[in-house]
Amino acid sequence: MDEKKEILSSPLKVKMLGRFSVSYNDNIIAGGSNYSESQFVYLLQMLIHAGEKGVARSSLEEVLFESRDINNIRHATQSVIYNAKTKLKQCGLPDCNYIEHKDGVFYWTDKIPVEEDARFFEEACIRAEQCEVLEDKLSMCLDACFMYTGEFLGSQAG
């Protein structure tokens, strides 16, 4: 049996267009109506949207700590990641290494599938752009328009 399916059969649902939210089994983990920007939220947004490319430590630290003067930024980053993993487990996600690290790059685990609206939208736009049959292209563009529910991470100024 596929290891991904053994760990989690339902995907993590992530809404990046319009009001940000992350939910699992219809339970909101982050965002939604009680949306507040926090290091936990920024971490999830960056890792999940980056996908297989991951996020370099320096980029992650820049977003998480901005221009704050921190004595040991590496330790602070590890602390944010540890706290995020703890919170994710408390929210009901199965126990696994949610945030993986390899060669200075952080990744969201591939053991928990993700359905991200922004990625679906982007893929629909690419398919429409590549389509050569005008009627099909128009239909695909219309489908993509209905997927668009607001600006990408619209509540963030940066």
Image: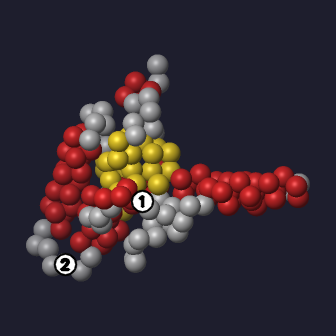
Residue sitting at the far left: 71
Comparing 137 with 3, the one in front is 137
How many numbered discs, if any?
A: 2
How packed mark 1 is, by other alpha carbons closer than 10 Å (few <14, some 14-19, many 20 or more), is: many
Q: How is the image coloured?
A: secondary structure
| CB contact under 8 Å: marks 1 and 2 | no
* The quadrant where residue 64 appears: bottom left
Q: Position of residue 108 (x, y in %)?
A: 38, 48
Q: Could you tell me the amino acid type at mark 1?
A: Phe
Comparing 70 with 89, the one in front is 89
Q: Position of residue 158 (x, y in %)?
A: 40, 77
Q: Could you tell me the amino acid type at mark 2?
A: Arg
Q: Nearer the viewer, mark 1 or mark 2?
A: 1
Q: Is residue 60 left or right of residue 67?
A: right
Residue found 30% across the figure and 72% down from its top? 62
Upstream in sequence: badge 1 or badge 2: 1
Instruction: Give the numbered dot on residue 20.
Output: 1
* The quadrant where residue 9 appears: top left
The Cα atoms of the two marked residues, 1 and 2, are separated by 25 Å
Q: Position of residue 66 (x, y in %)?
A: 27, 76
Q: Is residue 144 left or right of residue 96?
A: right
